């Protein structure tokens, strides 16, 4: 963590949407199938497997603990050293934060809220990267980067502190609005 005044970070959990939702539903179905198999096994063995049932229950808890982390995703936004760094945090075994975007804040032509007023700025980009935790978040912002004749838009969520830091490094291109945090 930075000790600078011009530092801000914010982490949000990815809401279950799209493929992430399908993965979560798939895991829940597997959990239900596992419990059903254990119940059927206990009935077939005429209740003689109480100890086995307890062991299968402990195994189930361990499986849920490790497998649920595979579908839990977080997004981390960090404004440090005049850069906006967006990372993807997966809590799987041995996983490390993956930086998906790292650019100087001053390089962005505009940093503004995702709303109808700026729709022409964020909707017609050559490449759009959506790293918001929730696509319907009222704190959604976008940053547009023009590089080598191509435009790239990165969507993310902000806090008041992040907006102040972005305004400090890119005073012309940053639109400040009231956000929840």
Image: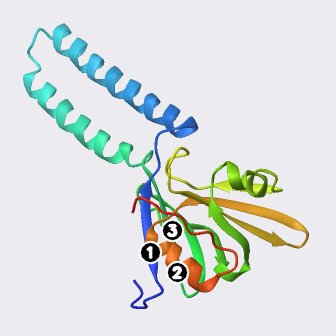
Residue density around tag 1, few if under 14, some if 14–19, many if 20 or more, within 10 Å: some
Q: On the image, numbered disc 3 is attached to which residue?
A: 77
Q: Quick check: 70 left or right of 86?
A: left
- Residue 34, percent from left and from top: 31, 24
Q: On the image, numbered disc 2 is attached to which residue?
A: 165
Q: Please, is residue 27 above or below residue 145 in the view?
A: above
Measured in 3D between alpha carbons, the distance from the residue under mark 3 to the one under mark 2, in whole angstroms, is: 12 Å
- For mark 1, give the secondary structure: helix
- For mark 2, give the secondary structure: helix
Q: Please, is residue 122 above or below residue 2 in the view?
A: above
Residue 161: mark? 1
Q: Quick check: 28 left or right of 79?
A: left
Measured in 3D between alpha carbons, the distance from the residue under mark 3 to the one under mark 1, in whole angstroms, is: 12 Å
- Residue at (24, 20) in percent of width and height: 38
Residue density around tag 3, few if under 14, some if 14–19, many if 20 or more, within 10 Å: many
Q: Quick check: 37 left or right of 80?
A: left
The answer to which image quadrant residue 10 occupies is bottom left
């Amino acid at each position: 963590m930075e000790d600078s005044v011009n530092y801000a970070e914010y982490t949000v959990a990815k809401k279950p949407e799209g493929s992430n939702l399908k993965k979560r539903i798939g895991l829940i179905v597997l959990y239900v199938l596992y419990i059903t198999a254990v119940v059927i096994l206990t009935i077939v063995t005429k209740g003689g497997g109480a100890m086995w049932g307890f062991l299968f229950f402990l195994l189930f808890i361990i499986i849920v603990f490790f497998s649920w982390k595979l579908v839990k995703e977080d997004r981390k936004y960090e404004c440090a050293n005049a850069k906006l760094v967006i990372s993807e945090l997966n809590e799987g075994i041995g996983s490390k934060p993956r930086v998906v975007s790292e650019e100087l804040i001053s390089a962005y032509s505009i940093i503004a809220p995702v709303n109808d007023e700026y729709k022409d700025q964020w909707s017609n980009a050559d490449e759009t990267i959506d790293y918001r935790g929730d696509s319907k978040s009222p704190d959604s912002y976008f940053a547009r980067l023009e590089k080598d004749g191509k435009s790239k838009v990165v969507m993310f969520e902000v806090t008041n502190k992040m907006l102040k830091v972005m305004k400090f490094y890119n005073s012309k291109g940053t639109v400040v609005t009231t956000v929840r945090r």
